[in-house]
């Protein structure tokens, strides 16, 4: 699973930030690793010019092998909170999506065949 981190001009990107994002994302999505080819993380500060306490937005898109990408976002007061919130949303969404696909593949018929006696 490849993890790419992107920031806008208001957020300083550094090795520590990249490491944090990689650790949080890979830990949360580890069990889905074989189903996810790439994860794109976009970080931005929506209110950087309006106030010192800007609204940090984290948008994450996961590319599932053979399926449509899943995108989630989270807004929070700090960078770490917005990353954690978005990762949790993505984890639930991927789990739900893959669970539904698994259920469809392994569904049993709604009827029971009667055996002749």
Image: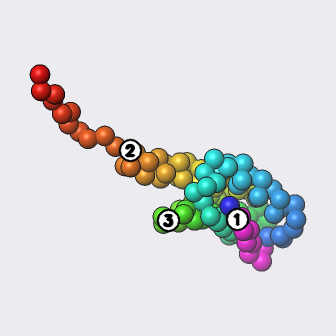
Residue depth check, mark 1 versus mark 2: number of the one nearer the observer:
2
- Eyeballing the image, is 13 above or below 76? below
x, y (%) of residue 98? 49, 51
In the picture, residue 90 is in which quadrant? bottom right
Q: Residue at x 75, y 72 (%)?
A: 7
Q: Quadrant of the C terminus?
A: top left
Label 2 crowd (10 A; few <14 / some 14-19 / many >=20): few
| First-in-chain label (1 vs 3) | 1
Disc 1 versus disc 2: distance between alpha carbons? Answer: 29 Å
| First-in-chain label (2 vs 3) | 3
Q: Which mark is residue 66?
A: 3
Residue interval drawn in magenta: 3-10
Q: Are marks 1 and 3 in contact (CB under 8 Å)?
A: no
x, y (%) of residue 87? 65, 53
x, y (%) of residue 105? 38, 49
| First-in-chain label (1 vs 2) | 1
- Eyeballing the image, is 3 above or below 49? above
**Dot 2: what SS?**
loop
- Eyeballing the image, is 114 above or below 105? above
Label 3 crowd (10 A; few <14 / some 14-19 / many >=20): few
**Dot 1: what SS?**
strand
Q: Nearer the viewer, residue 33 or 114?
A: 114
**Residue at the far top in the pictured view:** 117
Q: Residue at x 84, y 70 (%)?
A: 12
Q: Which mark is residue 2?
A: 1
Q: Residue at x 57, y 57 (%)?
A: 35
Number of marks drawn: 3
Disc 2 versus disc 3: distance between alpha carbons? Answer: 18 Å
**Residue at the far front in the pictured view:** 117
Q: Which residue is mark 2?
A: 106
Q: Nearer the viewer, residue 8 or 113?
A: 113
Res 1 visible: yes
């Amino acid at each position: 699973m490849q993890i790419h981190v992107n920031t806008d001009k208001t957020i300083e990107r550094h090795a520590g930030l990249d490491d944090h994002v990689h650790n949080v994302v890979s830990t949360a999505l580890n069990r889905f690793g074989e189903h996810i080819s790439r994860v794109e993380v976009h970080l931005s500060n929506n209110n950087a010019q309006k106030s010192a306490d800007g609204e940090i937005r984290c948008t994450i898109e996961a590319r599932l092998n053979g399926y449509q990408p899943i995108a989630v976002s989270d807004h929070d007061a700090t960078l770490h909170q917005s990353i954690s919130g978005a990762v949790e949303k993505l984890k639930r969404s991927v789990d739900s999506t893959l669970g539904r696909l698994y259920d469809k593949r392994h569904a049993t018929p709604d009827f029971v065949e009667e055996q002749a006696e």
